[in-house]
Amino acid sequence: MKFLADLHIHSHFSRATSKILDPEHLALWAQKKGIKVIGTGDLTHPGWIAELKDKLIETGSGLYRLRPDLQKIVDSQAPPSCRGTALFMLTGEISCIYKKNDKIRKVHHLVFMPDIVSALKLNDRLSRIGNLLSDGRPILGLDSKNLLETILETEETAFFVPAHIWTPWFSVFGSKSGFDTLEECFEDLTCHIHALETGLSSDPPMNRRISALDNYLLVSNSDAHSPAKLGREANIFETGLEYSRMIQAMTDGHGFSGTIEFYPEEGKYHLDGHRKCGVMLQPEETGKCNGICPVCGKPLTIGVLHRVDDLSDNKVPRSPELSRDFFNLIPLTEILSELLKCGPATKKVATLYESLLSKLGPELQILMDIPLSDIGEAGGPVLKEAINRLRMNRVVCEEGYDGLYGKISLFGAGFNFDHFSK
């Protein structure tokens, strides 16, 4: 069975997240996006675990679904063209901040668990190390290797993935606090790492420039802080809808077909720069100024592209970069925002978005699969051309840097749409 899964998200118990990040809204937006399996996020938070125990029921396959009464409410809110039961996998993100090899490390990791009982066992152990109530993504003064060891000791079928591995501030290869190799971070337990999360600012070809990563599966997830951000990155599975089958696919690659990716240029840490000074630089330009902001004289934030350059042993992607499909997409609301010349969060965009879903089906199907003729009939010739350009990767990029998202457009400033109406 082929389906989409977004396994790194957050709940309303995490800082700087939407108040409606609850199971019901996640299930609703999963239907709108066309996602079959959602990570719960925040499995270490006692309040979120309690809410999940109340609102979800086991399927017998290591996955969960909404209680029937809640599912009925969600179905009544979803467009009929998008309806389908979303399943949940127990997942969470943990932040490790510690000193190793005379440097402060700040590394985020994803944890996958087969059931709530296992999650509670893990939480009991981790609660002796840090305050799990403080945030849905807890901060622990624990070496990444020791965290991995604790998880493996708690549940043998648990799964562990270094999160958004290139993010400057909080990742295993981050320019500010990371390592140069996985072995430096995980030592003799590196053999238990099978998959790496690319993050919004990198894509598979960038990662495949580093031969040391060739044997690791690359996964992508949204890291959503609101339900509407689900699916901006996701994974394509061809397995049974079971925890064990999905984990096996991320372990050996069989049944894992590919990923849906942000354009890495849109990620907020793609290039080097200093946002306060409006300075954005390519890696070679950063080298010429010795990593110092030419405006204020303070160190620049070194972005993902630069960090990949530093660790790369090839200027072009290596095998197996073509062994799995990946699709760079632009969220439909951003496309509609460009066409309607208004913000993506405006009522005008939301109204057209819901109309298109009602006529055509889930968002990711619109972006990737639905025939252009059907899109033109439902949304007009300009939208048809926009989706055609997206599928052909004909985009205009403004790169993100130092915490500022980039912008990907399909037509560019000043494009004349008049001939579409003739």
Image (spheres, rainbow, N blue to C red):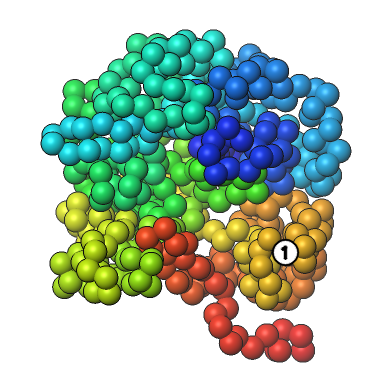
Q: Quadrant of the N terminus?
A: top right
Q: Is residue 181 visible?
A: no
Q: Secondary structure at mark 1?
A: loop
**Residue farthest right in this picture:** 76
**Residue farthest left in this picture:** 102
- Residue 180's x, y, as percent? 19, 43
- Residue 72's x, y, as percent? 84, 30
Q: Residue at 40% across / 17% down in the picture?
A: 126
Q: Residue at 66% across / 63% down in the picture?
A: 344
- Residue 247's x, y, as percent? 46, 26
> In the image, 271: left or right of 239?
left
The one of 325 and 250 positioned closer to us in this rendering: 250
Q: Residue at 44% across / 62% down in the picture?
A: 404
Q: Is residue 332 visible?
A: yes
Residue, disc 1: 346
> In the image, 92: left or right of 338?
left
The one of 85 and 349 positioned closer to us in this rendering: 349
The amino acid marked with disc number 1 is Thr
Q: Quadrant of the C terminus?
A: bottom right
Q: Residue at 23% across / 61% down in the picture?
A: 299
Vertically, is 125 above or below 206? above
